[in-house]
Amino acid sequence: MARTVTRGSKIGWTIAAWVVALLIFFPILYAFITSLKTEPEAIAGFSLIPSGTFENYVTVQTQRDYFKPFMNSVVLSIGSTILALLFAIPAAWSMAFSPTKRTKDILMWMLSTKMMPAVAVLIPIFILFRNFGLLDTRIGLTVMLTLINLPIVVWMLYTYFREIPGEILEAARMDGASLWKEIVYVLTPMAVPGIASTLLLNIILAWNEAFWTIQLTTTNAAPLTAFIASFSSPQGLFWAKLSAASTMAIAPILILGWFSQKQLVRGLTFGAVK
Amino acid sequence: MGSITLKQVSKTFGEAKVIPSIDLEINDGEFVVFVGPSGCGKSTLLRLIAGLEDVSGGQILIDGKDVTRNAPAERGLAMVFQSYALYPHMSVRNNIAFPLKMAKLDKAAIDKKVEDAARVLNLTDYLERRPSQLSGGQRQRVAIGRAIVREPSAFLFDEPLSNLDAALRGTMRLEISELHNTLKTTMIYVTHDQVEAMTMADKIVVLNRGNIEQVGSPLDLYRSPRNLFVAGFIGSPRMNFVKGENARSHGAHTIGVRPEHIDLSTSAGAWRGTVGVAEHLGSDTFLHVNADGIGTLTARVGGDLPVRHGDQVYLTPQEGRIHRFDDKGLAIK
């Protein structure tokens, strides 16, 4: 028998779900509201009604160029994602289709690097970056973001590739497909949804990464995360401008996320739903 | 042409010797069934012939040519998989056409072959559909279609019907047999279902733990099983085995009697027993009888026999239908 849902409980749960969703979304909403306030209003205390000024956005743009960190964010997130996929696709491929006794261990080892607190290796990384002249360069940061997201990318692709039944590849082999044709006509079309959601998720992870991007950049390669942070330092706190900068930083990725919801949800469930 | 010869073929996975050493001759046009319990190496043997696994030793010859080191596609064989293994992102038409495209045939030739195959397999109306929009039986026919367009020298079937329900399995069994009669191409068919083996095969190869127990026609295996394993595996319900004094009186360590070769009486007979479960199939009844001093015996009797649970009955094995085995389990001629 199907479970019966009474009208009352349905309404109750709907309200509860909305409350939770609003609670989660609230910091973003409040940043947006604050960005429309004047500085005195912003520090005055809790209020949901701004005076509706767009002045902060103008100030932020004139004080600091928004376009440069925006472009840095775009280059870093897309660049590091493409680089990560270039390494991860062959790696996940071989682990999924010709695993060895150590495959599981390698996967666990890769994931274990994500368990380490990043700050623990800040000093050695910083020194290495300085010695190789990578500080505040797009190349240096792209490599860094690639490396920190690589374990997750490999894991995600591995789970997707594992879902492709081996018999289909064997059928292609029997049908006379060379390795290359097998990849082009059979494997890739079946793997594209998985690769696409991995790509999207990794762009978002790279866009939002705030530890390394702030530590390893000053001006040249600084992405939007560093751009936001810069409003909280030298001349004291300017909450309204800080909020305007934050809103401008998260808007692009929110829009991207909104339009790719379906792919992302599939990506985040990590291949659990077949 | 499609004769296949295995010479001392062996396969090991790490430490495990899955197939110690097998010699086998498959003639052109034969329908050969590899049958055995799960884990007996029958699928591995098929995959070795297909080239999907490399042999650890020995030779595989197709039409006298050594193909042991050839890639699967170079062996001229086609395979139908248990899971159908259709390409989910392609239409039925493109699924069937795939091997022809790989062989670089021109478009007109491909279209003709695909449509011919579709007509034979009743798939003409479904050519533009995706595999996910088809039923299990239709998917299996697409898989067969993809195999026949290649005009292979032999077809390999790996438990192709085990994902289908019982009724459909019966229909598909007939269709595959008819296909074999039409094409007259060598077919190697792997199954754990001895009914499929008995009904379809020209030649059955019974496998157990990677070894061939016996090779022969279905009736050969039924009438003169070489050992206890084959005797127990072929035939449904299973052959009854009796040891001890009853066997010694026939000059054997073990005797075997098929359920259909036991006569039943309510008044007198060789073995007395009590009726346990009676399985009424309509046409037949399978009686499970607890025989005194022997154990449970199965007897196949007429459909409308008036016996009930707990009744006392007498069972008598038909002389001349008793199989005798020595202490090593081998049949005594």
Image: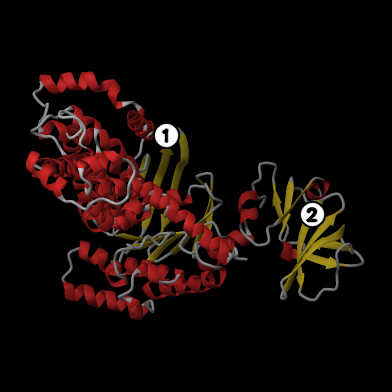
Q: Earlier in the sequence, mark 1 or mark 2?
A: 1
Q: Residue A238: percent from the left, percent from the top?
A: 20, 36
Q: Is residue B15 left or right of residue A112?
A: right
In this view, the residue farthest toward the right is B267
The location of residue B8, given as percent across then percent down, is 41, 43
Residue wearing tag 1: B14
| Camera sees residue A103 | yes
> Circle 2 — which element?
strand
Occupied quadrant, residue A100: top left
Left or right of A235, for residue A197? right
Give the x, y percent position of residue B39.
52, 47
Say few, some or many: other residues with alpha carbon within 10 Å of mark 2 (under 14 / 14 to 19 / 20 or more): some
Give the quadrant of the N terminus of chain A: bottom right
Amino acid of disc 2: Thr
Please name whichever residue, A205 or A218, is drawn nearer the observer in this view of the structure: A218
In this rendering, the answer to whether B196 lies above or below B54 is below
The image quarter containing residue A131 is top left
Q: Mark 1 and mark 2, same subunit?
A: yes
Q: Is residue A208 above or below residue A48?
A: above
For the point 45% across and 32% down, the residue is B15
Residue shown at the point (37%, 51%) measured from the top left: A163
Q: Residue at x 26, y 42 (%)?
A: A42
Query: Which image quarter holds the C terminus of chain A?
Result: bottom left
- Marker count (numbered): 2
Q: How is the image coloured?
A: secondary structure
| Chain letter for the residue marked with disc 1 in the picture | B
Distance from the alpha carbon under mark 1 to that under mark 2 = 42 Å
Residue B190 visible in this rendered orientation of the protein:
no
The residue beneath circle 2 is B296
